[in-house]
Amino acid sequence: MATEQELAPVTASLVAESDRLSFLPEVVGPHFMRFEALVYRWLSNLSQDYNGGFWNYYRLSNGGFYMAPDKDAALRLVVDGNAFDGEVSSDAAGIVATLFALGQMAEEIEGSAGVDAVIDHYHQLREFASEHAEAGLIFHAID
């Protein structure tokens, strides 16, 4: 029988302004600056609509996290290699960029002490993405 925790949806909470400076070092570890740059680069490469700006950080109830641009406008994503070309919310675009960055970071730090945590964060974010309103688009983009 499933426990109440297993049945509860994964929720996202916006990281408070006062916690922003410590958030990425806490969840990513010593590679946090490289990771943040990867997220920005991934979205820049995936979307001509993205032109920088403020990003929000979200903590997930399952221990995961993600970053998303603070924009109300949808973004068109084009993913070379899997034929994805679609419009998604900035929240979904952030999830896609964070998933790609986590995957790349795991590859870059393979064999180091922090790789297991990065892989766990990838799976925690995928779990959240599976319940997202744009789950189909997110999974098509990352597939």
Image (cartoon, rainbow, N blue to C red):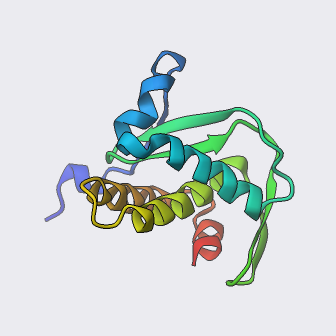
User: In the picture provided, is 52 more to the left or to the right than 125?
Assistant: right
Looking at the image, which residue is at 78% across and 41% down?
Answer: 52
As rendered, which of 10 and 17 lies closer to the eye?
17
User: In the picture provided, is 135 more to the left or to the right than 29?
Assistant: right
Residue 136 drawn at (x, y percent): 61, 71
Q: Which residue sits furthest left? A: 1
Q: Does the rendering let one see residue 130?
A: no
User: In the picture provided, is 118 more to the left or to the right than 73?
Assistant: left
Residue 113 drawn at (x, y percent): 24, 55
As rendered, which of 68 and 113 lies closer to the eye?
113
User: In the picture provided, is 107 more to the left or to the right than 101?
Assistant: left
Looking at the image, which residue is at 73% across and 79% down?
Answer: 80
Looking at the image, which residue is at 70% across and 56% down?
Answer: 43
Q: Is residue 81 above or below residue 27?
A: below
Looking at the image, which residue is at 64% across and 55% down?
Answer: 92
> Which quarter of the rendering shows the N terminus?
bottom left
Residue 68 drawn at (x, y percent): 63, 44
As rendered, which of 1 and 101 lies closer to the eye?
101
Q: Which residue sits furthest top? A: 18
Q: Does the rendering let one see residue 139?
A: yes
Residue 111 drawn at (x, y percent): 28, 66
Q: How many labels does the image show?
A: 0
> Which quarter of the rendering shows the C terminus?
bottom right
